Image (tube, rainbow, N blue to C red):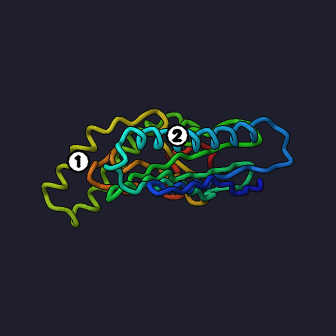
Amino acid sequence: MVLIQTSSIEKKDNLSVCNLNYPIIKSDNKKNIINNINQRIYEDIISFKASIEDILDMIPVKNRCLSCINTDYYISYNNNDIISIPIEFSQIDGLYNISYINSYNYDISLEKEITLEDIFDSTIDYINLIANKIENKIKELSKELSMDKYIMLLDYLKDIVLSDSPTFYIDNDGITICFSSYELDPMIYDISTFKISFDQDREYLNKYIL
């Protein structure tokens, strides 16, 4: 287990509010992996801030709404020299709220980033498994949706292009796959998550993660 402290970047003016909280890992372990993780997180925070500011600078002042940019994190797993820290990046601009998650999953002792290939058994097509999880969740929600909305969501599902490493984080009972809302439906402005359970999905998982 490593110690994790919070650092922040705050800025406020008439047209924008910036409140960026992010973790800094502290450890007696002298391995380079600690510095690498901290550097990567910091660079992602600064890049997010700069990209939003660049967009706002292109909008005439008279046309701008109050923009709020935030980051928040939590420690989903910190044990056995494994850490998993999802960070939510959010921008609220007028009535619009866009959020997405970056996650930082590392094995400190092995000095490596944990990927989905480390999570799943090598014989498993985990991209297809994740796609099925999404489809099943949409079916669960179908009772709350109109038929048109349900069909539209299924169409979006078919169009999703999953990379070899979708965003995920580790917790005590499984792996959570994260999608920005607009990857599923551009009219939904929240974050969608899909669980791979250590218990129920055990047959699909690598011995390493179990």
Q: Position of residue 32 (x, y in %)?
A: 78, 35
**Residue positioned most to the bottom:** 144
Which residue position is annotated with label 1? 154
Can the viewer see residue 100 in this picture?
yes
Q: Nearer the viewer, mark 2 or mark 1?
A: 2
Q: Position of residue 56 (x, y in %)?
A: 41, 43
Q: Residue at x 35, y 35 (%)?
A: 161
Q: Image point 64% across, 42% down: which residue?
A: 42
Left or right, 61 with reference to 115: left
Mark 2 surroundings within 10 Å by alpha-carbon count, few (fewer than 14), some (14 through 19), many (20 or more): few
Q: Residue at x 53, y 54 (%)?
A: 18
Q: Which residue is mark 2?
A: 50
**Front-most of residues 14 and 163:** 14
Closer to the camera in the image, 168 or 191? 191
Instruction: Indicate the amino acid at tag 2.
Output: Ala
Q: Quadrant of residue 55?
A: top left
Q: Sequence order check: which comes first, mark 2 or mark 1?
A: 2
Quarter assignment of residue 37 = top right
Residue type (three-letter) at the residue carrying disc 1? Leu
Query: How far across and down, in percent of the image, does residue 108 sit?
Result: 74, 43
Give the residue drawn at x 37%, y 47%: 61
81 displayed left or right of 29: left
